Amino acid sequence: MKRRLSPLVLIGMLVSACGSEASLSQSALDQARVQGVAPDLIYVVDLPGYKLAEQSIGGVGEEGFGAFYVSPEGRQVELRIDRGTFSDALCADTPITDADPPTAPVRCERDEVGWYRWGGGRHEYTAVRADHFIRLKGRVGEVDRAALKAAVSGARHATGDGSATPTPPPGPVERGDLPTSGDGAPNNEVGPGG
């Protein structure tokens, strides 16, 4: 006898999964950790029409996390998480990365998620959580405000409790041009005619 889940049970399961941790490949997590990223600052977002470019994952500042999400058309949205705080006072005084011109005035609106900021053809959402902030930014016209807001609002940790240790970096590469005796320098003797 087949059992069917009631719609309410199914909705409950889906809602409870919304806050669950998202997965990144182990090599992407290792890459971030080897670069000094704090495990509690590794987040992912859901951004319709965009996919995480794992090769872009890396460190930001001393222990922050950064990554790019890309669309099939080549549009990019940048995710950054770093220690610190954000406030109404900082909003207009903090330049928007890649604004054109870099000195473009920054306009701000505060809402229940955080701060929506725009200027110089770029826009972003910044949200504060505990001792860090999450920032998602892109070009005006390539990603809309509602998508940025929803993604920042739903940002979640990509790792568990941070107890996993990174895979050690690979050992030295075996080179065929080094002599087996002597000081280890390549043999650069000049032969006849040279």
Image (tube, rainbow, N blue to C red):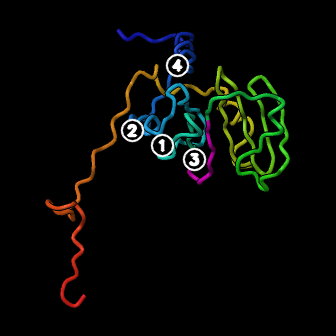
Contact flag, marks 1 and 4 (Cβ < 8 Å): no
Q: Which residue is mark 1?
A: 54
Residue 27 within the magenta-colored segment of the rendering: no
Residue 75 within the magenta-colored segment of the rendering: yes
Q: Is residue 25 left or right of residue 65?
A: left
Identify which residue is drawn at 21% across, 70% down.
187
Q: Sort mark 2 into few (<14), some (14-19) or many (20+) by Cα contacts within 10 Å.
A: few
Identify which residue is drawn at 24% across, 64% down.
185
Range shown magenta: 72-80
Q: Sort mark 4 into few (<14), some (14-19) or many (20+) by Cα contacts within 10 Å.
A: few
Q: Quadrant of residue 80?
A: top right
Q: Which residue is mark 2?
A: 27
Q: Sort mark 3 into few (<14), some (14-19) or many (20+) by Cα contacts within 10 Å.
A: some
Relative to 37, does residue 122 appear above or below in the rendering?
below
Q: Which residue is mark 4?
A: 17
First reached walking from the N terminus: tag 2 or tag 1: 2
Q: Of tags 3 and 2, which is closer to the observer?
A: 2
The label shown at residue 70 is 3
Image location (x, y in percent) of residue 103: 81, 52
Check disc 2 and report its element: helix, strand or loop.
helix
Q: Is residue 146 left or right of residue 164?
A: right
